[in-house]
């Protein structure tokens, strides 16, 4: 994650795909894939209502680097 921060100079968050019927349990992202396994996040929704999640990629808050800390 530090290498990605050094490359892009922005906040970095790790995500993992979850089954669509479980997205209401997690915060999920919406964004554009810029290359394999790398997305520009346009939106994060915390525990969306069932069926309204923008994707099935959930974010991992413990794996988050915020630019305010660098």
Image (tube, rainbow, N blue to C red):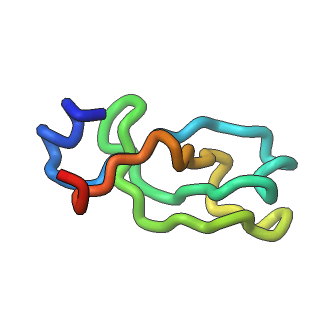
Task: Please give the name of the residue rendered at 72% of the width and 39% of the height, measured from the top-left corner.
Answer: 18
Residue 31: where, in percent of width, then height? 45, 57
32 above or below 50? above
Number of marks drawn: 0
Task: Please give the name of the residue rendered at 64% of the width and 58% of the height, measured from the top-left corner.
Answer: 27
Quadrant in which residue 4 is drawn: top left
Quadrant in which residue 16 is drawn: top right
Which is nearer the eye, 13 or 42? 13
Task: Please give the name of the residue rendered at 63% of the width and 53% of the height, measured from the top-left corner.
Answer: 55
Quadrant in which residue 60 is drawn: top right
Residue 65: where, in percent of width, then height? 33, 47
Residue 29: where, in percent of width, then height? 54, 56
Residue 3: where, in percent of width, then height? 19, 30
Task: Please give the name of the residue rendered at 30% of the width and 33% of the height, measured from the top-left corner.
Answer: 1
Lateral position of residue 10 relative to residue 51, left or right? left
Which is nearer the eye, 43 or 67? 67
Which is nearer the eye, 2 or 54? 2
Lateral position of residue 30 relative to residue 54, left or right? left
Residue at the far front in the pictured view: 69
């Amino acid at each position: 994650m530090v290498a990605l921060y050094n490359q892009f100079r922005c906040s970095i968050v790790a995500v993992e795909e979850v089954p669509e019927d479980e997205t209401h349990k997690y915060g999920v992202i919406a964004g554009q894939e810029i290359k394999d396994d790398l997305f520009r996040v346009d939106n994060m929704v915390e525990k969306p209502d069932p069926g309204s999640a923008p994707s099935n990629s959930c974010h991992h808050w413990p794996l988050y680097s915020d630019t305010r800390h660098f």
